[in-house]
Image (spheres, helix red, strand yellow):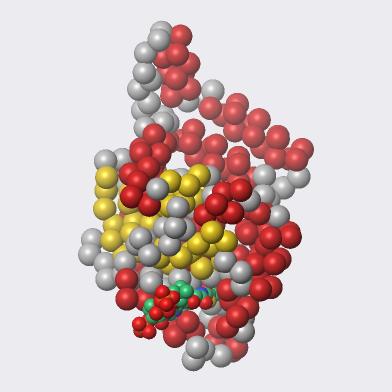
Amino acid sequence: MAYEHILAEKKGRVGLITLNRPKALNALCTPLIDELGAALDVFEADSEIGCIVLTGSEKAFAAGADIKEMSERDFIDVYSNDFITDDWEKVAKCRKPVIAAVAGYALGGGCEMAMMCDFIIAADNAKFGQPEITIGTIPGAGGTQRLTRAVGKAKAMEMCLTGRIMDAEEAERSGLVTRIVPLDNLLENALETADKIAKLSQPVVMMAKESVNKAFETTLAEGVMFERRAFHTTFALEDRKEGMSAFAEKRQPNFQNK
Ligand code: HXC
């Protein structure tokens, strides 16, 4: 499918989505968000795709929501239309794993979008921040919540109150990103990681993702019980039998996603 503001392609079992609005540093305008949602729907529905990578350019993952588009909006407009609704949350709601491969700026809505992914791999030039306060507003796509859960109150509060930008080193130290890789290797590294996930049993991968996400939504006891039931459920799958048999027989498993 041809898009105007993104590129979407299949790389074997991996769906690669590239934010592609270079003149605006991938600012997340409404048509871009619509296209991103459409591309995610296509990959979600495609049984050949087991993992998705979301990336931007070398200079910017995304420099935020489109400030020029937002500048003319007023309260009744954003309130009535519930600006930042399901379309933005589509990344977070995706059932297949989504890896953010972030180079350059991930600011405002760009940082929020990266945090909606399951994990972030950062290039050494990545910069993260929630600078909304400097333009008279606050994060609106989960930044105050997801950044706080990722890096703790002190850093999240400072970043949201001052707009301070975190470099890749600090982001890794703080737990915002899983690792830093050289800029030139970013995409290759993210695609390799995604391919590893895509070769596993898709239903089991989804259960693992749901279980980790449960940790952010519930008490420890309920989360542990949720995990245990999901673990039990894997025993209903042929893939669980195949995985354990393959280990015992010293061969690679051949998962059938059932
Ligand atoms: C619209 C943007 C943009 C944005 C950059 N551009 N960020 N347009 N919305 N968020 C445009 C610039 O206007 C410019 O267009 C072009 O991209 C290149 O940007 P420059 O500023 O010239 O580049 P540079 O000097 O390298 O500075 C990079 C930058 C800066 C530090 C990232 O662009 C910047 O501060 N951007 C805004 C960051 C921000 O405040 N983000 C939060 C947005 S609010 P022209 O046409 O002039 O060449 C937000 C709210 C989220 O995200 C709430 C829920 C969604």
Picture quadrant of residue 17: bottom left
Question: Where 169 falls versus 57 (above or below)?
Answer: above
Picture quadrant of residue 23: bottom left
Q: Which residue ends up furthest to the top in the rendered image?
A: 249
For the point 35% across and 60% down, which residue is it?
A: 58
Residue 22 picture location, percent across and down: 32, 71
> In this view of the protein, can residue 38 be seen by the observer?
no
Q: As rendered, which of 21 and 180 lies closer to the eye?
A: 180
Residue 145 picture location, percent across and down: 66, 61
Residue 123 picture location, percent across and down: 43, 52
For the point 57% across and 61% down, which residue is it?
A: 166
Number of marks in the rendered image: 0
Q: Which residue ends up furthest to the left in the rendered image?
A: 2
Q: As rendered, which of 64 and 255 lies closer to the eye?
A: 64
Check the picture and name the quadrant holding the N terminus.
bottom left
Check the picture and name the quadrant holding the C terminus.
top left
| View quadrant of ligand 1 | bottom left
For the point 37% across and 32% down, which residue is it?
A: 199
> In this view of the protein, can residue 212 be seen by the observer?
yes
For the point 54% across and 70% down, which residue is it?
A: 108
Picture quadrant of residue 212: top right
Residue 204 picture location, percent across and down: 49, 33
Is 221 left, or right, of 77 in this rendering?
right
